[in-house]
Amino acid sequence: MSKGNRSKIDNLGRVVIPKSIRKALDVEANSEISMYVEDKKLIITKGYQTCSICGSKDVTYQLKDKFLCSNCINDIKSL
């Protein structure tokens, strides 16, 4: 299924996800979503990303297609 709309980002960096797309993802108010960059595209999915190393939900950084939490980043820096 492919649905698409154009939208503008407001001065606070917000964008409205159109109703048709929210419905397709079964996303309602206060649903948790995840946003990340893949091949220069913004990907929005229902749910959340986890750290590629430890599985933590506290992701703070994306490196290509990998997601990292601050604890793992600090561990890597200390190597």
Image: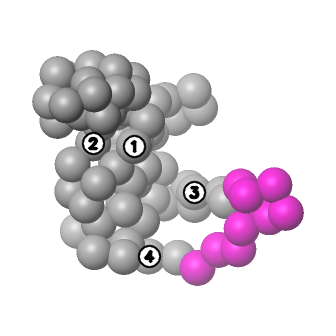
Measured along the vertical axis of the image, is residue 13 above or below residue 5? above
Please, what secondary structure does the residue beneath circle 2 have?
strand
Give me the residue at 66% from left, 57% from top. 16
**Residue bearing mark 3:** 17
Mark number displayed over residue 67:
2
Please, what secondary structure does the residue beneath circle 3 have?
loop
Give amino acid for label 3.
Ile
Report if residue 21 lies within the magenta region: no
Q: CA distance from mark 3 to mark 1?
A: 23 Å
For the C terminus, the image quarter is: top left
Report if residue 11 lies within the magenta region: yes
Please, what secondary structure does the residue beneath circle 4 have?
loop
Magenta span: 6-14
**Residue bearing mark 4:** 4
Tag 1 or tag 3, which sits nearer the N-term?
A: 3
Q: Position of residue 78 (x, y in %)?
A: 28, 28
Tag 4 or tag 2, which sits nearer the N-term?
A: 4
Q: Nearer the viewer, mark 4 or mark 1?
A: 1
Measured along the vertical axis of the image, is residue 50 above or below residue 65? above
**Residue bearing mark 1:** 61
Q: CA distance from mark 3 to mark 2?
A: 23 Å
Measured along the vertical axis of the image, is residue 78 above or below residue 2? above
Give amino acid for label 1.
Tyr
